[in-house]
Amino acid sequence: MRKMIMAAACGIVFGTGLAAAQQAPAIHEGHLDQIDTNKDGGVSRAEYQAFMTAAFAKLDANGDGFLGQNELSQITTAAQFASMDANGDGRVSRDEFMNQVMADFATADRGGDGHLR
Ligand SMILES: [Ca+2]
Ligand SMILES: [Ca+2]
Ligand SMILES: [Ca+2]
């Protein structure tokens, strides 16, 4: 389920569209290739963080520095939004967003070597 956030973020940042992300919730290799900016065959935490920073900026449609439920409604359920909104103020700050997606990175990094490949 959490991977869908990354897949949807890929759709937004790379312009492949949310519909495509929703139909194919897995992260496909083309996405990892694009996140892998130094082309060493793996996505490091720094590369992932840079990508997600870009995703946050794209998702923040009104540019207030927070993601409201309306801005995330296409890629998260209400329950997912609530779990990202750690302090319960009804909006997801950059820190809350990054905490969530970096936890996703740790989950996806099955080998535990700090790279997704
Ligand atoms: Ca890399
Ligand atoms: Ca916003
Ligand atoms: Ca919050």
Image (cartoon, helix red, strand yellow):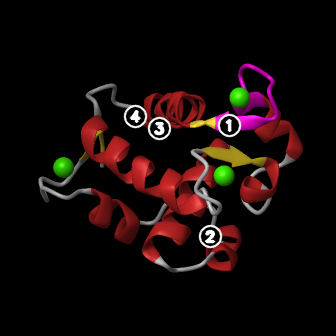
Q: Is mark 3 within 8 Å of ligand 1?
A: no
Tags 3 and 4 touching, CB below 8 Å:
yes
Res. 26 visible in picture: no
Of the two numbered discs 1 and 4 on the same chain, state the one appearing first in sequence: 1
Query: Is disc 4 surrounded by few (<14), some (14 to 19) or many (20+) residues within 10 Å?
Result: some
Say which element carries label 2: helix
Of the two numbered discs 3 and 2 on the same chain, state the one appearing first in sequence: 2
Q: How far apart are marks 2 and 4 (CA)?
A: 21 Å
Is 54 on the left or on the right of 8, as rendered? left
User: Magenta segment range?
Assistant: 83-92
Residue at numbered disc 2: 21
Name which residue type carries label 4: Asp
Is 25 on the left or on the right of 37, as rendered? right
48 relative to 12, above or below? above
Of the two numbered discs 3 and 1 on the same chain, state the one appearing first in sequence: 1
Name which residue type carries label 1: Val
At 63% from the left and 78% from the top, the residue drawn is: 20
Assign ligand 3 to one image quadrant.
top right
**Residue 86 among magenta residues:** yes
**Residue 90 among magenta residues:** yes
Name which residue type carries label 3: Ala
Q: Quadrant of residue 32?
A: bottom left
Residue at numbered disc 3: 108
Q: Nearer the viewer, mark 1 or mark 2?
A: 1
Residue 52 in percent (x, y) is at: 44, 48
Query: Is disc 3 surrounded by few (<14), some (14 to 19) or many (20+) residues within 10 Å?
Result: some
